[in-house]
Amino acid sequence: MRHQRDDDEGHGLLAALAGVVLIPIFLAVLWIVIVFNVRYRTCVQLENGANLGYEAVFDLSRPYLQPIAVPRLNDGTPILRDKLWSIKITPTSIYGLSLEPVDERGYRFAWRADVGLVLEADNPAEYERLVAEAGHANWDIEINNIGTGALMNRLVDRPGFDVGRCPTSLITW
């Protein structure tokens, strides 16, 4: 009988040690999920019918699981899933340059709600027309070339923009 009691004490000690180790890990993971969920579900509504928001709450393909900001439709669907540079936003359109290499220069795009996404490489005439009709861009922000994340951060702090929580995927990769 003494042997049975020693086994029970050993299992109890292992369970206590597992609890001491697993509870702090669980609390740390829970804290990360809550912080990421609050931060990366934020979006800025735009006049042109789109919004600037994050692609997902967690991006398994990026360092530290941090997602990138992208232009999105109101249902949370990204218009483009690539890192954008030199993004221009007008009351009717979004256009700019992606850093993702289709060729050595990346690719240029334009989006308007009634037309959809147009890539310069696929339809140069339509791309040029959309950019020409777009009008004044980026609300007199003094930086000429700005990425989506930096632009979103500036718009969040500006008065007059509807900043809120939007539908966002939990995970992408």
Image: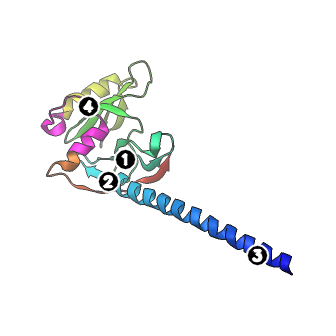
Front label number (3 vs 1) = 3
Label 1: which residue? Answer: 54
Which of 59 and 30 lies nearest the eye of the viewer?
30
Which of 152 and 110 lies nearest the eye of the viewer?
152
* Mark 3 vs 1: CB contact within 8 A: no
**Percent of width and height locating residue 29:** 49, 58
* Mark 3 vs 2: CB contact within 8 A: no
In the rendered image, residue 72 lying in the magenta stretch gets the answer no
Q: Report if residue 47 is visible in the image.
A: no
Label 3: element kind: helix
Label 3: which residue? Answer: 8
Label 2: which residue? Answer: 42
Instruction: Look at 20% across and 34% down and name the residue there.
Output: 134
Front label number (1 vs 4) = 1
Tag 1: residue type? Tyr
Q: CA distance from mark 2 to mark 4?
A: 28 Å
Left or right: 157, with 64 as reference point: left
Q: Residues within 10 Å of mark 4 (few under 14, many from 20)?
A: many
Decide: is 8 above or below 80.
below
Q: Earlier in the sequence, mark 2 or mark 4?
A: 2
Q: CA distance from mark 3 to mark 2?
A: 50 Å
Instruction: Look at 30% across and 27% down and name the residue there.
Output: 127
Tell me the number on the disc at residue 39.
Answer: none
The residue range painted magenta reads: 135-154
* Mark 2 vs 1: CB contact within 8 A: yes
Decide: is 135 above or below 153.
above
* Mark 1 vs 4: CB contact within 8 A: no
**Percent of width and height locating residue 157:** 19, 49
In the rendered image, residue 147 lying in the magenta stretch gets the answer yes
Which of 48 and 105 lies nearest the eye of the viewer?
105
Label 4: which residue? Answer: 130
